[in-house]
Image (spheres, rainbow, N blue to C red):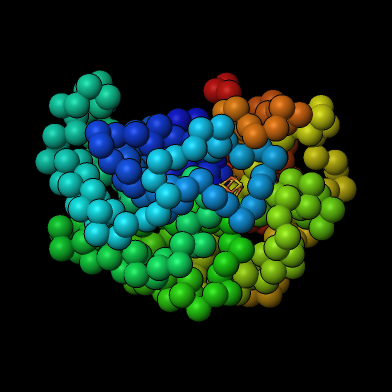
Amino acid sequence: MHSSSETSNPLHARHERAFGGNRFVYPVLSRRSGGISVGVNLNPDKVCNFDCIYCQVDRTRQSETRFVETDALRVELERMLRLVTSGGLYETPQFARTPALLRRLNDIALSGDGEPTTYRNFDEIIAACAALKDRLGLADVKMVLITNASMFHREHVRRGLAILDAHQGEIWAKLETGTDEYYRLVERTPIPFRQVLDNITEAARVRPLVIQSLFMRIRGAPPSAAELAAFCDRLGEIAAAGGKLKLVQVYTVARRPAEDFVAPLANDEVDAIVELVKRRTGLPAAAFYGVRA
Ligand code: SF4
């Protein structure tokens, strides 16, 4: 799931996932979070249960890796965590220019070239990552799940979320539409909007969630005032049902999207949405721009 070449990045952004001979694990320098995010790609086959019009995963090239191999992933993750914490990462050409202040491990981001919770052994892989983190003395390092929230109702996903809760986990769930019609236009999935809303509400009752919302121009048109008002209403309904939302991150497109009729919003348009969300919902909200101001 998502803007700049930053890490724990919004909405499944296309990162530079290649590092060494790795197939599942890759480091990203995140200026925003002030350190290195170690990404774990649970969808090497690039298959997703959404088909977002703005998706920034490059599907023009097929991946050679089709399946997650748990043992290989674990080996890559251990090697990468050791490389980052030992400082060896900064001796590699890609990371040699990392500023001193950013030479720290910030998080492990479970994301991928698709929806990570569709991986059938999701709970096992979360447990394996958490155990590894503990074994390496990295218990305090955050694990961030970047997700479209479509699978939270599945039992193995629920189990995985509970493991995250016990290991400094944070869930960044995508919600960026207010009406069924706009949802179908943007996300292009057979999964009902209601399912996603119910999943977010239920998950947010258990622990606070971060919401990630990407807005864009579609054939030149930004989201209408009515759509944005409906979006705020959905957030308000989640909160009214007992869901805790700790932050709404408002993004726009930062890299080449799947469809050429999609374009980024201007920075002031993103700011205006942030202000609207704050005003109408009372929730904390923050802006992330497509092009740096
Ligand atoms: S949910 Fe799937 S299609 Fe949508 S942005 Fe994320 S990876 Fe792309």
Q: Is residue 62 above or below residue 162?
A: above
Give the left or right position of residue 166, taking residue 95 as reference. right
Give the left or right position of residue 2, taking residue 242 as reference. left
Q: Position of residue 104 (x, y in %)?
A: 24, 40
Instruction: Name the residue furthest bottom.
Output: 155
Displayed quadrant of residue 167: bottom left
- Residue 242 seen anywhere in this rendered image of the structure: yes
Displayed quadrant of residue 179: bottom right
Q: Position of residue 108 (x, y in %)?
A: 33, 51
Q: Residue at 28% x, 41% y: name it.
A: 22
Counting labels gives 0
Q: Is residue 289 above or below residue 277?
A: above
Q: Is residue 105 above or below residue 247?
A: above
Which quarter shows the C terminus?
Answer: top right
Q: Residue at 30% x, 60% y: name it.
A: 70
- Residue 229 seen anywhere in this rendered image of the structure: no
Q: Position of residue 44 (x, y in %)?
A: 43, 47
Q: Position of residue 39 (x, y in %)?
A: 36, 46
Depth check, front residue: 282 or 66: 66
Q: Residue at 68% x, 28% y: name it.
A: 264
Give the left or right position of residue 115, taking residue 66 as reference. right
Q: Residue at 85% x, 43% y: name it.
A: 225
Give the left or right position of residue 168, taking residue 49 as reference. left
